[in-house]
Amino acid sequence: MDLQTMHDQLAERLSDKQLISATISQPRLKSSDVKRIKLKPVEIKKEYFIQFEYQHEHVLKHENLSLEEAIAKLTLLFNDFRQALIQFTEEKVQIQLSKKSKVSWKTEQTSSKKVELSHNRKKQYLLEDGVPYPFLVRLGVQNPDGKVKKQKYDKFRQINRFIEFIDDTLAYLPQDRTVRILDFGSGKSYLTFALYHYLRIEKGLNLRVTGLDLKKEVIEECQQIAQDLRYEQLEFLVGDINDYNDESAVDMVVTLHACDVATDMALSRAVKWDAKVILSVPCCQHELNSQIDAPELGIMLQHGLIKERFSALATDSIRAELLSLVGYETQLMEFIDMEHTPKNILIRAYKTGKKLSAGQYERYQQFTSLLSAKPFLENELKEYL
């Protein structure tokens, strides 16, 4: 298919108002400020628009375009981006453009979906309530008929939020070999099973996933569930991140609810393994709280509660900046609260190889100097800085 045919096909579907959602990714230039763009139809004052959400390195920007403007904009965007995943009412289209703009157009027929235009639309989950998923039934989130149990609906929402993050990683994962994924501190492994189901069952990726945790009883139970579900490429092992040395390269590292510097250990391992994707939800963060000494911030830090919260936010900011300094596109995203903790920040990092400038490293040093902080992660990554 050539470019003009592709544009005509897209224009036809958009003109018929078939769009459900779309993600445009893989900028042609590494220096591009916009990393990906998401599209969805919206109705404003009873008129049809397509909303473009531009994801910059640290911020999101939106614009609502008329149908004619949106078609013109989409045509221009393919000069700057190489991939698009588009969900229409009855089909899913994957577009890939080569360096010479040769078009690969793959279509997958899907069950009929309804276009929702309201700003207050009901949340469309990647895993649907009412559709039975064996792992959710086995984990007690759904009844056998697929109905989500009332007391588990928060968990269902959390799993779907996590799946959205996983879906966004697809462009960064290899398609021509086995994808290697490690989950440190997997615990009861709701999200580990969700990750495996979505990438293996829904997307058909060839992958091998390992969940690692210190609790033997929990690991044994998770391993039994994996066997019962015949998830042959999913394993659970008892172990500590400090002692896990079985890998030389990993594609994705997930660390959820790892306490204090255990998160930093996982992040440093991910960098050393050249992981293409890192997803981390930190838990308690004591290191900076015990180090911080900043008289200029005394009005805040004299209060123990404020100091604790500030230290947690500063810690995650430092982690994100360090990952950016060693070649990752890093964002701090809102996640749904983990069980038994108010922490709801997810660190998402994609390997780009583009390191920040010397001036940005100096800015980082000024910040840590202000706080009198000597971050564990900085020491772990010093050979990459």
Image: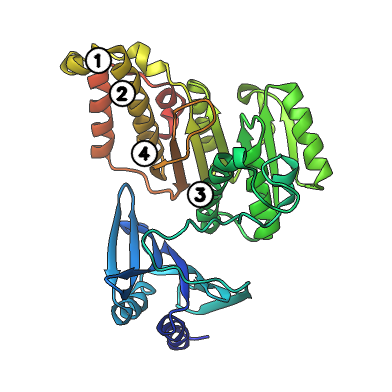
Residue at the spot 30% in from the left edge and 49% down from the top edge:
59
The residue closer to the viewer here, 210 or 383, is 210
Q: Type of residue at label 3?
A: Phe
Residue 249 horizontal/vertical position (percent): 62, 41
Q: Comparing marks 4 and 3, which lies closer to the viewer?
A: 3
Label disc, if present, on residue 310 of the rendered structure:
2
The Cα atoms of the two marked residues, 4 and 3, are separated by 22 Å
Tell me if residue 283 comes above or below residue 322 in the rendering.
Answer: above
Q: Type of residue at label 4?
A: Leu
N-terminal of the pair, mark 2 or mark 1, is 1
Disc 3 target residue: 165
Label disc, if present, on residue 301 of the rendered structure:
1
The Cα atoms of the two marked residues, 1 and 4, are separated by 28 Å
The residue closer to the viewer here, 203 or 240, is 203
Other-residue count near label 1 (Cα within 10 Å), few / some / many at <14 / 14–19 / ≥20: many
Disc 4 target residue: 325
Residue 41 horizontal/vertical position (percent): 39, 70
Tell me if residue 323 comes above or below residue 167 in the rendering.
Answer: above
The Cα atoms of the two marked residues, 2 and 1, are separated by 8 Å
Q: In which quarter of the image is residue 12?
A: bottom left
Q: Can residue 330 be seen by looking at this rendering?
A: yes
